[in-house]
Image: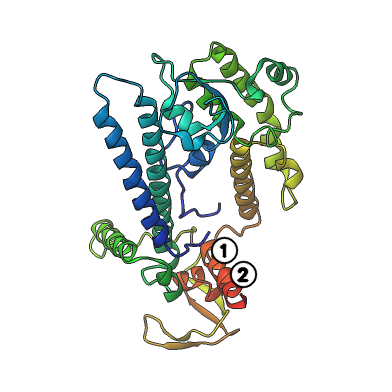
Amino acid sequence: MDLQSYMPVPPGIRMEENFFSLDDILLSHERLPCRTESAFPRLGFLEKSSETRDIPEMPLWLAKGLYERKRQVLSVELPKVYREEWRTVFGADPIVVDLHKMGPYYYGLGSQMLHFDSPENPEIANTILQTFIGRFRRTMDSSQNAYNEDTSALVERLDCLERSLFRAGQSGLNGFQLWEKGRSSHLTASSLVINYRKRKIADLQA
Amino acid sequence: MSLLTLRRNFFNVHVITTTKIYRENCLNEAKTEGKSELIPSIKFRHSCLLRNQRCIAAYLYDRLLRIRALRWEYGSVLPTTIRFHMCAEEMEWFNQYKKSLATYMRSIGGEEGLDITQDMKPPKSLYIEVRCLKDHGEFEIDDGTVILLKKNSQHFLPRWKCEQLIRQGVLEHVIS
């Protein structure tokens, strides 16, 4: 197994975000369509040219910060992928959908959408779960059987969560293959060192 | 996966912006006595502040995680090229981390302590065959003999002495 000294903060589980996780920060950058129910005085600089004082799309972090259940400040609409039409598509056959194109953070964003108390929450949660279950087998299978080949075709249609699972599978596969060949006790230069050296040469050439 | 120079001027801009936004918020708050109209704007600015804070904190934390990894990969002494990319506080953190790790290693495993940065992969033999990848000068082993590490020379050396150099890419483990 590739020895990991650098262990970045993983993304949060379920509806929680990890504060320091870079993946979660990128995830909360995704934009959501929304409607502002009350005015935002003194923030006129945000209003570009429209007459209505509406901010039609907000990043997730802003929507979460402004949303309040009791007071009517913001109402968040569901992005396309989580609506009725797409839910039936996922129900029919989850494997064929290109999840990377549908927003690279399908599962993460879906879990965060549950914060906004939409009446469709149970269905959304169920769809996300069923989609994951439907696609998992294919991901696991391909990650365990693609040894030493170009995996870009396999990884293309996966969303970020599935990609990290794929990488974990590949790392396990490579470790096993090394062990089978008897090279598990073969000492190697650390990948960090190799990368630093590459960068140094690139700097010199620049 | 490399550490780049800490972007100091970026931080200065951030501090200035944060102070401006915060003052704006305070000003608004002072006027709201009983009126709750300005609250959405205050919340808006506050969310922006929290967001900036989160991004910067995560950036700094990630740098620390990478620096910690450097201790395990490079050993106690970092090459100058890497040290150049670290700021003084990070160097300080690295030294403290080294000290904590050393104290811990001394406390386990009996009298002399246990070096846990060794034997990352299960050892199969005491001595290993290594080939030199670049000139590293002279190298002394336990019984006093001095070996000259010249490029492409091959040696049969004790495993625990070479492990560090192999990880740094100076030597290469040869398996026949």
Task: Say which residue appears at 25% left-offset and 65% top-offset.
Answer: B112
* Amino acid type for the residue under numbered disc 1: His
Within 10 Å of the Cα at label 1, are there few (<14), some (14-19), or many (20+) other Cα atoms? Answer: some
Q: Nearer the viewer, residue B80 or B143?
A: B80
Quarter containing the C terminus of chain B: bottom right
Task: Say which residue appears at 48% left-offset and 44% top-offset.
Answer: A22
Where does label 1 land, which residue? Answer: A186
Q: Is residue B13 above or below residue B156?
A: above
Task: Say which residue appears at 62% left-offset and 25% top-offset.
Answer: A79
**Residue B152 visible, this orientation:** yes
Residue A80 image offset from top left, x and y in percent: 66, 24
Chain letter of mark 1 equals: A
Whether residues under marks 1 and 2 lie with C-beta atoms below 8 angstroms apart, the answer is yes
Marker disc for residue B175: 2
Q: Is residue B8 above or below residue B129?
A: above
* Amino acid type for the residue under numbered disc 2: Ile
Identify the image quadrant of residue B45: top left
Dot 2: what SS? loop
Task: Say which residue appears at 55% left-offset and 13% top-offset.
Answer: A122
Chain letter of mark 2 equals: B
Residue B87 image offset from top left, x and y in percent: 36, 65
Q: Nearer the viewer, residue A185 or A61?
A: A61
